[in-house]
Amino acid sequence: QVQLVESGGGLVQAGGSLRLSCAASGSTGSINAIGWYRQAPGKQRELVAVISNGDSTNYADSVKGRFTISRDNAKNTVSLQMNSLKPEDTAVYYCNAKVIISTTRFQYWGQGTQVTVSS
């Protein structure tokens, strides 16, 4: 089991910045990749950014060049630095951890944190 707790959401004006953090606990050694998804009202949840154990990263095209994902393995945290925010970035942001044990895949979710970008 992996528990994820997000923090850092809030209200910001367009062009501003926010930093989200996710603290992982439990069986953190079994995490293969960890990252962020978001879900805007009336839309499907979508990948924002993910970082693997090998520190390779993947970003949604809509956030490339504006968002940066990083992890601190010693603290079991993953952060998302969001710059040049746009109103379309408004969503609930969820931390996600992917675990592979033998051939079985699991994923865990945080409770979500609201990000609102005003125009």
Image (cartoon, rainbow, N blue to C red):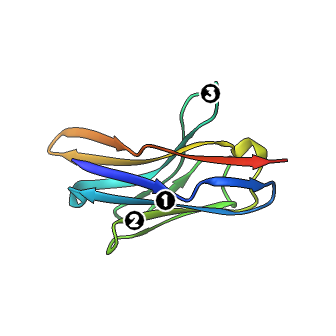
Give the residue type that dot 2 points to. Thr
Answer with left or right where residue 3 lies relative to residue 93: left
In the rendered structure, find residue 77 and report the number of the disc placed on it. 2
Residue 81, located in which quarter of the rendered image?
bottom right
Name the residue tied to disc 3: 43
Contact check, label 1 and label 3, Cβ < 8 Å: no
The image position of residue 102, as x and y in percent, is 14, 44
Contact check, label 3 and label 2, Cβ < 8 Å: no
The image position of residue 87, as x and y in percent, is 77, 45
Image position of 44 with respect to 2: above or below: above
The kind of secondary structure element at disc 3 is: loop
Answer with left or right where residue 2 lies relative to residue 92: left
Answer with left or right where residue 13 lies relative to residue 67: right
Give the residue type that dot 3 points to. Lys
Circle 3 Cα neighbour tier, 10 Å, few/some/many (<14 / 14–19 / ≥20): few
The image position of residue 24, as x and y in percent, is 33, 58
Give 116 or 81, whichever is nearer the viewer: 116
